[in-house]
Amino acid sequence: MNEHELLLKRINLLEYHQKLLVKLLNNPNLEFYKLIIEYGITEQEIDKFYYLCNELSMKLDEQKAEGYVYFHPLFAKFSASLPTKMKIEDVIKACLLQKLYEPLFQEFEKYLK
């Protein structure tokens, strides 16, 4: 990657974080957005994160409907797919505080204990 491309990536990251900061001004309780900025996560990484959460939420609903009560395989997939900079405990807590994918993260929270 040349210097120009690297600079462009950094500008895009800053613009994305700036958008999140504006949202935080209106609502300082958006804990997950704080984590994104703190860990320097890119918009592309977060898009993948949301896609994964949607997929896992659907699987959780399907499995609950089929009578499953053990969801560790979903937790393991989530854990393995997180951006390496992020700590799973922080992500789960922040998403619950921000009310993102609540049923999913309420289940995942059980595996932190």
Image (spheres, helix red, strand yellow):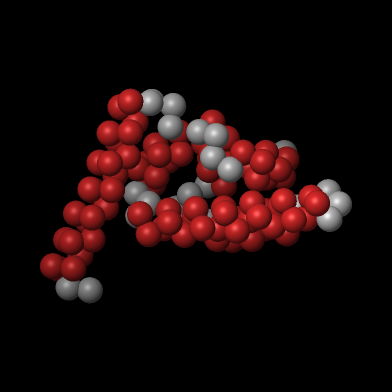
Query: In the shown orientation, is residue 92 left or right of residue 71?
Result: left
**Frontmost residue, 9 versus 51:** 51
Query: In the shown orientation, is residue 28 left or right of residue 16?
Result: right
**Residue at left 48%, top 49%?**
86
What is the x, y in percent for residue 71? 76, 52
Which picture quadrant has residue 30?
Answer: top left
**Frontmost residue, 17 versus 60:** 60
Whether residue 4 is visible, yes or no, is yes
Query: In the shown orientation, is residue 71 left or right of residue 103?
Result: right
Q: Residue furthest bottom?
A: 1
Q: Residue furthest left?
A: 4
Query: In the shown orientation, is residue 40 left or right of residue 82?
Result: left
**Residue at left 52%, top 47%?**
87
What is the x, y in percent for residue 11? 19, 54
Which picture quadrant has residue 110?
Answer: top right
What is the x, y in percent for residue 14? 23, 48
Image quadrant where one finds the N terminus: bottom left
Q: Is residue 23 above or below residue 60?
A: above
